[in-house]
Amino acid sequence: MQIPSGLEAGVEGDLLKAEVRDLDFYYGGFHALKHVTMPVHDRKVTALIGPSGCGKSTLLRCFNRMHDLYPGNRYAGGGIVLHPDNTNLLAQEVDPIEVRMRISMVFQKPNPFPKSIYENVAYSLRVRGMRNKNELDDRVEAALKGAALWNEVSNRLNELGANLSGGQQQRLCIARALASDPEIILFDEPTSALDPIATASIEELVTELKENVTILIVTHNMQQAARISDFTAYMYLGEMVEFGITDQIFIKPTKKATEDYITGRFG
Amino acid sequence: MLQSADLDAIRAIIARAKRWDMFFALLGILSLMVGVLTFTALFVDMAIQGVPRLDFEFFTSFPSRRAANAGILSAWVGTVLVMLVTALAAVPLGVAAGVYLEEYAPKNWITDIIEINISNLAGIPSIVYGLLALGLFVYYFGFGQSILSAGLTLALLILPVIIVATREAIRAIPQSIHEGSYACGATTWQTVSDHILPYSSAGILTGVIIGMARAIGETAPIITIGALTFIAFLPPAPFAGDPPAGLFEWIFAPFTVMPIQMFNWTSRPEAAFTVNAAAAGFVLVFMTLAMNGLAIYVRYRLRKNIKW
């Protein structure tokens, strides 16, 4: 598999799950992503860092075509190729719903539906047409176990998701994202609304999840990126400044701009 | 170092600022009382006059030339049936229109024009709706001076209220819930039916009740389409009579409604009819309050399970 030029940072032999190729994106007249290129390694954690407004969330939300929900947003060139089938996720003829069935998302603020814990997790299975009660039960249990929430909620699956604590709610949302067996899970600053203890549990969970699924995470917290990611991408003003193995980015960044941001001199 | 003189000055400023608080609170209470006291005075006056007149016969008698024998049977049955048609027509149309505008419609100038017009429709005098209905429902569609025509007329009248309420209720759902549903791979219809409608139903219901409360008291458009002011029979019950009526034959029956019955009685010279009008007015207000009470209860039940 070919890695785009200038980004040969991956470990040799690593599989790529997706590639962002020369991607341009506009919010109306605002050029939010400029020729962004980045590999996403299979079953690794890739962190997107950078100051507010740099385009990291914008890039993340391209992966599940969230931008399609709002008028005026425009994918203006390039694409995101998903492997192994080489589908360009941003192609006009690719249905955004198909993309969202393959790539799920966990949001900044926990957003459980005002339904029961069980129904929250089952929802991503129900939209896929699953009706069999036993099968649903099994998949919901597996997802809640995968999100390290099962032991806390197994005896109150019919309670409202909103009755859980913030950290539990976020793990519920992770279970919802996990239930459908996605190829990639997108995390958009998943711990920014949580206290340190809940944050630690989510970070631990992310590290465990990468055994089975590719993870892309946007974070404001550089220590978090350093702790949990295998690869880090630093973005600034809509451009990909530097991409590399996390240790290298944090210890020996090749670009001055990256170093300034990481050392806190800027941003 | 803070001088005690400074402290006194600060306290004087606070005291002066607080006088405005007091002033505004009083002004607010006064404004509130204008409405509340006026309504209470009217209601109490009506109750004192009307309540002694209320007995079982009043509800089961047709209007009569003798005030003591007259009742509101045809009026309250007419009102209930017209409201039923109004609700059945206006709620599905209004909710569907609101959902379409919020969830499906592209944001362009056509949508903008439609939006502005919906707000304007809410301000059109009800008599204009009556004239429209007279031409359209009564003559063109040939529904006649029937419960169906009246129900559809009032449905048109309250449609903008329901559309606006539906849109407000949908907008109150956090964007994150909306995005959460799409991120699971839901289609727009799945998002609407599984999330948008269930979570906004309490707000929609409030709009429906506000609309219905307005419709129940409307007189002008109903008179315009030709409701009778004196009617001594009921619409045919489904499958009753000889030959048996059809399930929906009642919708084509002539009718009268509570406000028209009241209007008719107040225009009579005898004092006894004024008492009848007061009694009927009391019943009408009670019907409206009962509808509101039911809405508050249902809303409470619906909201109990909705937390963001």
Image (tube, coloured by chain):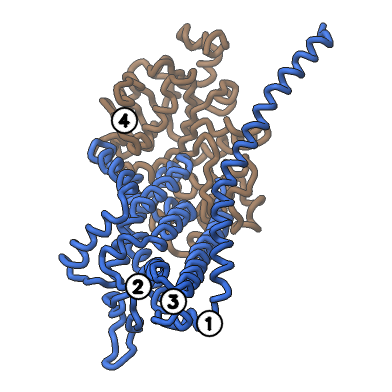
**Label 4 sits on what residue type?**
Asn
User: In the displayed image of the protein, which residue is found farthest to the bottom?
Assistant: B242
B271 and A63: which one is in front? B271
Q: Report, in whole angstroms, how far the alpha carbon at label 1 lies from the one at label 4.
A: 66 Å
Tell me: residue A45, above or below residue B137.
Answer: above
Give the alpha-carbon distance from disc 3 to disc 1, as whole Å. 11 Å
What's the distance in space between the residues labelled 4 and 2, CA to CA? Answer: 55 Å
* Residue for badge 4: A73
Residue that label 1 marks = B56
Nearer to us: label 3 or label 4: 3
Few, some or many residues within 10 Å of mark 2 (<14, 14–19, 20+) = many
- Whether labels 2 and 3 belong to a single chain: the reply is yes
Chain in blue (letter): B
Which disc, if any, is residue B165?
Answer: none
- The kind of secondary structure element at disc 4 is strand
- Marks 2 and 3, Cα distance to the nearest angstrom? 10 Å
Left or right, B276 with respect to A169, comes to: left
Q: Residues within 10 Å of mark 1 (few under 14, many from 20)?
A: few
Chain letter, colour brown: A
Please give the label number shown on residue B256.
Answer: 2
* Mark 2 secondary-structure assignment: loop
Residue at 38 percent of width and 43 percent of height: A100
Q: Identify the amino acid type marked 3.
A: Ile
